[in-house]
Image (cartoon, grey):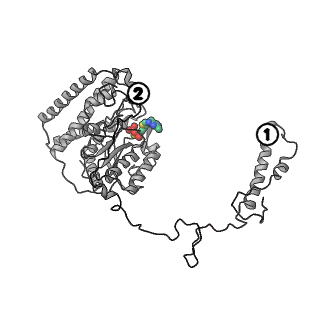
Amino acid sequence: MSPSSNGAAVTLVTRQQCLDLYYYMRLNRAVEDQMMKLFRQNKIVGGLYSSLGQEAISVGTAYALEKRDWIAPMIRNIGALLVKGVKPRDIFTQHMAKFTSPTQGKDGTSHFGDLKNLHIVSPISMLGDLIPVMTGVAMAGRYLGQGIVTMTWIGDGGSSTGAFHEGLNLAATQRAPFVLILENNQWAYSTPVSRQVPVRDLAERGRAYGITSVTVDGNDAIAVFEASRAAVAQCRAGDGPVLIEAKTMRMKGHAQHDPAEYVPKAMREYWEARDPIALFEKYLDANKLWDAKSKQEIETRIAALVKEDLEFAENSPMPPPELAEQGVYCEGCHTIEAEWHRSKAEVTPPESSVAAGWNVKDFGGIETSAPGGNGASARPAAITPQQSAGKAVSEPLGKAVQASAGRALQKSSGRPIQQSSPAKKIAEVPERRPFGRGPKGKRGGGR
Ligand SMILES: Cc1ncc(C[n+]2csc(CCOP(=O)(O)OP(=O)(O)O)c2C)c(N)n1
Ligand SMILES: [Mg+2]
């Protein structure tokens, strides 16, 4: 397994951390395997998206965070939700639109959050909008003195949107304690990365904004965890943001309805041989971090948890019809209070007042500087008659317009609409001189 990829001091990953990473990856897969069965039984409401083959990314990144930190997951980040403390039953009930789900059956997939306890911002879009949102959360946390780091994920396709670039630039400019995980899973629906972006490593996109950007093997749980841990430490130290590109492969179609027949066979086989869970099992074996008994214990624990939570979800009722008209508008149900972790006096005047670092003479003025000043004038220099819009621009343009107007008129009706020559007619229109563009009555005539 790779050492820390961004050059940070390498701290060993403990045995317990390795076993935790394995547990969450296995749980992630077990929950999704179960949901695939539910989908085929027609018990899932809406679409079902798979993170098969990407578990090391969701788990390895979220595992680097602390409880106080904030995440905003994407559709393929169920692993991150589990690490953050969401229970499998919440994921099952949410996908089945049950009354016991976090949204009481009002929304599906991973469209739910928990601002109060787990610090999860509900997804608003797959395509980049969470980047400015999580930048804002990071800035707010810094302002309130909370010492938090925020994290969200984006796909290779999502990294080509305006929201991605605007958000990342904002994060970079504000030095927000924010980690962006770019899951390069080779496909954006049916478009391969090579036909979408002319660069090899999508981490280049972060470098363009002057932020630390690294590329890691997204199927190597230790590499992902180490890079994420270093990124979180960098952000916590005030040197964020950080972008981590994790190269991986989307092993299913975009969603259950997509058989992904466009994926070349050789490509699929290459990645099948690099399954992140199988790779990690080999790592645990080779480093004697577990034995057959501890592996069996993990399997038994996961099977029992999934069974219990599935039963809970299956036995849960659908929402009552009258719920549909409740909670549509907020009627005082949300009282969001800022959690100050430092004295407000620190961020309010006079303590927060900072003397301006620079001063420009006559800044904001409209009059010319006094004689003997720096000579700069706040008023634009007078426009010379030659520069004025009059002659130079409008005459040739006028001729071009009148010629084409004449052609258009003749073409549309087969004969000129007006008997008089269009050229002569347009020539009679007085020259238009926009107000304030030059001295009146000079060359070129006025109004
Ligand atoms: C504005 C908009 N257009 C299209 C979609 C549908 N859509 C959702 S995800 C996606 C592809 C995203 O690809 P990528 O960012 O690579 O993420 P991946 O699915 O591979 O995880 C598309 C086309 C959408 N949700 N919103
Ligand atoms: Mg993709």
Q: Could one spot residue 24 in this view of the protein?
A: yes
16 displayed left or right of 112:
left
Name the residue furthest bottom. 372
Front-most of residues 35 and 118: 118
Q: Could one spot residue 189 in this view of the protein?
A: no
Quarter where residue 254 is shown: top left
Q: Which secondary structure, mark 2?
A: loop
Residue 110 numbered tag: none
Whole-percent x and y of residue 237? Answer: 28, 57
Q: According to the image, label 1 marks what residue?
A: 411
303 displayed left or right of 369:
left
219 displayed left or right of 382:
left
Whole-percent x and y of residue 10? Answer: 22, 55
Q: Are marks 1 and 2 in contact (CB under 8 Å)?
A: no
Cα gap from disc 1 to disc 2, whole angstroms: 52 Å
Q: If you read the primary sequence from the N terminus, does the residue marked by circle 1 or circle 2 appear first?
A: 2
Are there few (<14), some (14-19), or many (20+) residues within 10 Å of tag 1? few
Using the image, determine if residue 314 lies above or below residue 83.
above
Using the image, determine if residue 286 lies above or below residue 305.
below
What residue range appears in magenta? Answer: 370-382
Q: According to the image, label 2 marks what residue?
A: 257
Are there few (<14), some (14-19), or many (20+) residues within 10 Å of tag 2? few
Q: Which secondary structure, mark 1?
A: helix
